[in-house]
Every structure is written in structure tokens, then in C-alpha cells.
Image (cartoon, rainbow, N blue to C red):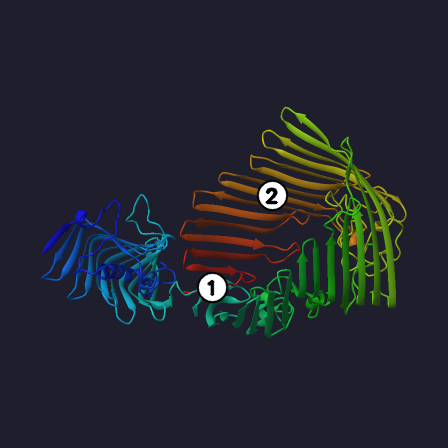
Amino acid sequence: MARFSADNICVPIRRKRFAAPKFLPSKTLRLALIAATALGGSIAPAFVPDLKPAQAQEFKQRDPNAQLLLKADQLTYDNDAETVTASGNVQLDYDGYNVVANRVSYNQKTGRVKAFGNVEIVEPDGNRIYAQEIDLTDDFKQGFINALRVETPDNTRFAAESAERFEDGKTVFHHGVYTACEPCKEKPNKAPIWQVKAQKVTIDGVTKTISYEKATFELFGMPIAYLPYFSHADQSVKRKSGFLIPTVGYADKFGFWYRQSYFLVTGDSHDLTFNATGFTKQGALGEVAWRHQLENGTYSVKVAGISQMTPDAFTTVPDKNVKERGMIGTKGAFDINPRWTFGWKVLAQTDNNFSRTYKIKGYSGSNITNEVYLRGLHNRSFFDLSAKQYLIQNNTVTGTGTAFQFTSNQPLIRPVLDYNYVTTEEASGGQINLDVNITSLERNVLSTTLVASGDDRTHGFDGETTRVSADLGWKKTIVTSGGLMITPSLSVRGDWTSANGIASPGNTITTGTYTRFMPTAGLEVSYPILARTANGSHVFEPIAQVFIRPDLNFTGVAPNEDAQSLVFDASTLFQRDKFSGYDRIEGGTRANVGLRYSGQFNNGISLNALVGQSYHLAGQNPYAREDDLTNTGEESGLETRRSDYVASFAISGTTGLSLNTQARFSENNFDVKRAEANVSFSKDKISLSSNYTFIAAQPDYGFNSDRQQVGLSGRYKITDNWSIYGAAQYDIQSDTVISDSVGFSYADECFTFSLAFSERRSTSPGAKTSQAFSFKIGLRTIGDFEGGFSGDDLEELSSGNTF
């Protein structure tokens, strides 16, 4: 037996390369290190350390010329027993792997490598493997390891009493425990928030799967779920067929429900998801979703259907009078090149409310837009060509056909084209802008509303309409030596419209063609005045605009599809055209005046304010047309020669408090016609927000009474982990709390939990209150489990992670 001190073999501090004696080839120690890491490197559940089962084989191919570095207090060679032992603070470095142990021995006769005492293995990816004893063959195909513990860079942990590795590539762990929670600093021996225990864990390096036998899930040290057997893919597998985490819940119209999903990998770039939801009242809902990733984009197809067992459980149509219900939907988006994209979203269903009623993911919104588009963006130009169909998912109690009315009122747009171009070079010192819009649409029903004045307000034109619009503008800003800012502008707008159909009850338009030509000359003058004080700086900026235009033909007579919504407030005061779309444009001469203020104080507070008014100077006022088909402009604040006053005010600062408000006041008596306010506060553990909206009655616009609501929401952080939150929305006119909710949540590095209760009420007298209870549990690296119980609608159905 020969003994060597560490100084005779290598210099520990300088870490010189070790040249082994002739009877101990360097391959021997190399195999010792590989064997020491092989077993630990096979731990790879989908929610367990990223240590791949085949990592040992991959490790051999990392760097065939890698050199082994050894540091130890003593090496012992026993020629008779043919063993080599490194003892005393043993450290092995090889190709990015580091092993520390009290003692490492290699038996040349049996080909066994053993490491004893405080064994720690650090892998190149940062994983740390701890054990008291390892015993492996030098080809690392078989072996045994005792008291195993693994920690990964993402703070996941795995431990087992013992582990064995077999020639067929399988590794078996006995009495394994897994968690993604860090141990308690004050009480390290305290059970983590959650952990998974299994009597036997088998990792198959060939099939890349991990199976668990007699597994128990524990929460706060208490077992809450038991699974005799389950399996999943290891973490090296990005996509793997398997069941997804289920969701559960209850709703009056549906009964108790349970949703189970299965994910099927059909290829490297495509997959299928099968969803089955069982309702105790309505039967089984089936869904199939297909996804396909191509080189330049993705597309998906979803199909769902149900044969309702108890349609009478619903109180509204179409839900209660359609038994066989289903849908098919598809989405796609592709990059033709870096500048152009092509895509679509299409939904077809048996009735107008199926996807909303059953919360089909991706298609459950109240407003769905079927669309096929081609878009281009380059430098300062934009192109958008699309065909659209608007679907309104709704239900009603007033009759069988009424539920479909809102969707049938929507036009089929075939197509709409938008093009915008802004010059990159100045023209005569200014900037040129070009806007082009082409819209062609068709509707098969006349949509009107009888308003307080006794007239019909036409929401939708029955027939075909095509409009071509082009707007070319020029603008330049001149700053004088005294600081006066002068901005002249010129523009010319041209429109051609062809309409064939019914515009209002009793008014039939056969083949009508409308042409409009609108030149505009504008001038804006502003004079920013800077004032500095001891506590901050202030900027006062008076602004005056004038736009000179001729009167416009066919104002209010031609179909109006995209300019029915008109809001006059501080944000639209200085716009050249205050109509919201292309179908209506301003004519006549108008001036806009106002005063803008901004202040910045030394204590961090910022103030912004604006007050102003608009004046119709000459020609016909386009907002006061009594023959307007849609009554757009009436009761807007712009229909008189002097408009209503508009104002806005905002304040924010370092205290966490911010306020944004704007209002419109009558030009005659300063009565409030419209007001909006948002207040928020956030500091330390508390955050609050409130909103208020008031809109005075607009009988000619279809609103016979005032609209007024106030809302409040807040969150309080009780501790670093616990929070409580709530919200409420109150309708002042009807004295109704239309919605309220309250809940609490817990969140830490490995576990999240939330519980919420909400209510919804209609402002209609005698309407039923809808109540819902929902919860969500999130386990880091495993997934989320959620459910809900509702007295009315379903909670959102969604799939969890593979397990």
C-alpha cells in the first residue's frame, strides 16, 4: 500500500493538473467523477430539477480532451486490493462539473466508484446534488445512492432516502419528496407550504417520463390529495401528451360541472387539445382545438358542441330554445415579410350566443369581429386592407327572434382599406400627410330607434354603401423671435359615396351617388409664457385656432356608419374635425380658443389644466342639422353658435395621489352636461382608486334620462404575503349597486391562492342578482387549479398545466 500527501501530487491552491501514476490511468478518476454525477443527473420530473436522464451519456461527449483536476489531503493506493482512495477534503473538477466529498474510492476489480460523507455535486447548469453515499459502476449504467438531496438554480428541491440506476436507463427513487418552496429560515425543519411525496419515483431515460407510485400531495404539512399512480414527461421534454389540470364549478343554469382536458402532441409543430366538460343539468360539452406552427406564422382551429339536456333551465333566448348547439372558430397570423402581415379570425356558430354562454376560450366576448386582413407598415406609411363581420353575442327575454336582432343589424364590410402616409422630408418647410379610406358594406335590415322628438334615429342603412375618401394635408409651425408659435395648415378632402337601399322608414333610396369636396385653410396661434417662482415653474399657453371651410353638401343625408359617436370635451377641442369617422365631416368656419396650463413644483407635484370653447363663425353648423339621419351632433354641446365650455384638470405627485378630471358646462348657465373623474392613491401597503361619470339626458340621441355612476376599488397588503381587495360600482340614477366584489389572496415564492366573491345587478326593477364565487391555487412549476360557483353564468373555463 502506498500513501501520498496531497503536496506530492498537486498544489491545491494553484490547482495544477494532476498526472496519475501508471497503475492508475487518468480515465479512472475521470470515470469516478462521471459516475458520481450520472445518477444525480437523472432526476428530471416535469416539475423537478432540470437534470436530464441521459445527461451522463451527453457528458462523455462534452469535451473529450478535458483534463481532470484533483485536490485532496491524501491519496492511498492499495496494489493488492487494486483500489485507489482520495480522502480529506476531496475536490474533483472535470469539464464544468465539481464534486466535493470526504472520501472517494475506486475499485479496479469490481469497477465500482464510491463517494462517502457530505457528497456535493455542482453541475454546469448550477444544480447542486447532496448525498451521504454513492456507489456506481465505472460505466455508470448501474448504481446506488443514499440520502439524496437536490437544489436547482430556480429554487426547486428534491430529496429521497435512496436511489438506484439500472442498465435499461431507468432510475428509481425510494420515498422521494419534491417542492418548489424554500425552507423556513426560522424553522428549517418545518414542512414547506406544499410538497409531493411518493413511495416510489421511476425516471425512464429512454421514454423521458417520470412515474409516481402512491403519491401524496401535502399543503401546509397536511395531506390533501392522494394518487395511486400518475406520470408525466421530464423537464427536458418541451411538449408531451398528457392530461391537464381539471377545473370545477357550479352555476344555476348548468349545475355542477367538471372539465378535463387532454393534450396530444401530433408532431414537432402541431398539437391537439381535447376538452370534455360535464354539466349535471346540460350534459356533456366537447371541444377540440388544433394548433399548427409554421415557419412564418401560426393558425388554430377550434370546434365545440353540446346537446343541451335541459334548455328550460335558461330564462332567455336563444339559450332556452336551441337544443343542439355548436361552433367552429379559426385564427391565423403570418408574416409575409418584415413589413407585411396576413391573418384572420372567424367564428361560425349555430346561434348568436353559444360561445358566450359556454365561455369558449378565445370566442366568449360579447363583441366578436370576424376578420380577414392584410397589413403593411414601413417607415412613416401604414396600409390596412380587411373584410369584417361584427357578431354581437347576446340574449334577451323579449322574444324568440329578438336575440338575433343585434347581430343582423351589423353590416358585412367587404372590404375596408386604410392608408396613411407622412412625408419624411419637409415640403416648403412643412409636413405633408395623406389619408385614404375606402369602405364597402352591406346590411339586410334597417336599424332605427324612435327618440323623444318623435323622429326615427337611423343606426344602420338597409342596403349597399360604398365610399371612397382621400384627405391631403400640409402643416408647418413657425416660431418667432418673441416665442409666438404660428401654425398654418392647408387640406383638401374628397369623398365619393354610392348608396342603394333604405335610409329611413318610408324613405327609399334607389341608386344614389354623393360627392363631397372640402378644402380647409387653418391657422393656429399659441404663445407659451414661462413663469418661475421659488417653489416651481409654470407655463401658461393661450391658444386660438380658426378653420375656414365652405358649406358641405349632403350633410346628415348620406348614410352614416362610422361617425355616430360624438364626444365633445377638452381632448377634442383643438381637433380640425370633431366627428369620429369618415362618413361625417365638418363644414363652415369655426374657431377654437383655450388656455393651457402646466406646472411643476419643487416638491414633485405636477399640474395640468385646460379650459376652452368653440365658436361657429360662418356657414351652416354641421352639428345642428335637424334632418340628420342619426341625430349626430344634437345635444353634443356644439349645436349652437357658442359651444359649451370644456375643461380638464390633472394632478399627480410623489405622495401617491393622482387626479384626472374633465367636464363640459352649458354655455348659458354653466350646468354640468358631462363630467368624468378618476382618483387613485397608492402608497406602502394600500392602493385605492375611484371613478365618477355623469352624462346629462340626450333625448334626441336616445337617452331620455341622466346617466350617473360612481365606482370604488382598493387593495390592502396585510403582510408581505397576504392581501385583501374589493370593488363596487353604484348607479346613482337607479339607486343600484350594479356590481360588487371582495376577496383575499396569498402569494409567496412557490404558492399563490386567491378567493373572491362577486355580485352583479341590473338597473331594471325586479332583476335577479347574479352571484359568483371563485378560487385559484397556483403551485410554482406545477400549475394552477381554479374553479367557481355561480348563480348565473359560468366562470371562465380554462385549461391548466400538464400533470
Image marks 2 and 1: residues in contact by CB distance under 8 Å? no
Where does label 1 land, which residue? 248
Seen at 89% across and 56% down, the residue is: 553
Quarter of the picture containing the N terminus is bottom left
Whether residue 468 sits left or right of residue 792 in the image: it is right
Report the number of numbered marks. Answer: 2
| Amino acid at the residue labelled 2 | Ser
| Amino acid at the residue labelled 1 | Val
Seen at 29% across and 69% down, the residue is: 170
Whether residue 152 sits left or right of residue 327 in the image: it is left
Q: Is residue 543 above or below residue 61?
A: above
* Residue 690 marker: 2
Nearest the viewer among 49 and 397 is 49
Q: Secondary structure at mark 2?
A: strand
Seen at 62% across and 63% down, the residue is: 337
Whether residue 632 is visible: no
Seen at 14% across and 54% down, the residue is: 76
Residue 108 in the image: state x and y as whole percent: 16, 64
